Each structure stands twice: as C-alpha cells, then as structure tokens.
Amino acid sequence: MTDRDAELVRAALEIAPGALAAGDVPVGAVVAGPDGRILAREHNRREERGDPTAHAEVLALRAAAAVRGDGWRLADCTLAVTVEPCTMCAGALVLSRIARVVFGVWEPRTGAVGSLWDVVRDRRNNHRPEVVGGVLATECAALLEGFFGSHR
C-alpha cells in the first residue's frame, strides 16, 4: 500500500455517502489515470436508477473511459473503492484492463477479489490486475456498519 492508495480510497470514502439520499449502500469508487489525476468519481446508484448494474465501480469505469475518450481500455489506471468488489464488478475490472484495484474493507459474503472468489487473479483470465486490499479498512467498515445498522 502506498500513500497514494490511501488518498484514492479516501476520495472514494468522500463520495460514498452520496448513495444514502436514495437509500443505497454507501459505496464510493474513483478511477485515477497514470499521472494520478482522478478521472471519475461515482457512488452506488442502483436505487436511484432502478438499475442492478449501477454499482459505483461500473459507473466509475464507464465515466473514466468517457473522459479518456480513446476507447474502453483503462490499462494504465487504478480503481479505488471502499469495499471489495462483487463478482459483476470484478468481471468489469478484468474486462476494462484496469491496472490496479485498491479497496478498503474486505467483503467475505460477496467479495470477488480474494474473499469469497478471486475473479481478478484467476490464471485463466488474459488480464489480471494488481490488487491491494484493506486500505483504510476501519473507516470504510464504519460507513457500511452505520448504514446496515440502521437498516436491520
């Protein structure tokens, strides 16, 4: 983990509460380019859009590709997210050719970047991004615990 990894997860933490207005799980994601500049910031928008694919990671990948304007490959970029990506998001990370995935808290029930599954590092894939987990895990877990504590 680098200081930049912590900065990126902190940026994802800042955007995550935006999901709360629509009653969605507060997950935030950012994509940074090779120069470190943040290309996209998104939070979960499933409830707001009525779209099961509107996870923060997928939305951030789409937005970053649009900002770059040179196709869908994000080979030299880093995605940082507050919680370990699910299977759908992990597949999108592989398909986008993202270079690095940095995340906050591990998700043992649905995580697909090392917990329940390890989609992104499966040797059968033609692309396997670097993975750094557990960055600012305490802060990321607190945000989720607060949300789920009030919804159960």
Image: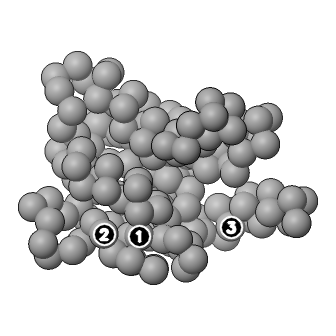
Comes first in the chain, label 1 or label 2: 1
Q: Residue at x 24, y 55 (%)?
A: 94
The residue singled out by tag 2 in the image is: 119
Work out whether 41 lies above or below 93.
above
Q: Residues within 10 Å of mark 3 (few under 14, many from 20)?
A: some
Residue 141: mark: 3
Q: Is residue 62 left or right of residue 6?
A: left
Give how far across and how far down residue 37 sits, in percent: 36, 32
- Disc 1, SS: loop
For the point 72% across and 61% down, the residue is 144
Q: Position of residue 52 (x, y in %)?
A: 55, 44
Q: Is residue 132 above or below residue 108?
A: above
Q: Residue at x 76, y 35 (%)?
A: 22
**SS at mark 2 in the image:** loop
Q: Quadrant of residue 49?
A: top right
For this view, does 96 lie left or right of residue 48? left
Tell me if residue 97 can be seen.
yes
Q: Amino acid at mark 3?
A: Ala
- Left or right of 41, for residue 21: right
Q: 70 and 124: which one is in front?
A: 124
Compared to residue 67, the image places residue 56 above or below, namely below
Going by the numbered disc 1, the residue's amino acid type is: Ala
**Residue 84 x, y percent position in the rendering:** 49, 65
Q: Label 2 near label 1: C-beta < 8 Å? A: yes
Q: CA distance from mark 2 to mark 3?
A: 22 Å
Q: Please, what is the three-letter code of the amino acid marked with disc 2?
A: Val
Q: Position of residue 107 (x, y in %)?
A: 56, 73
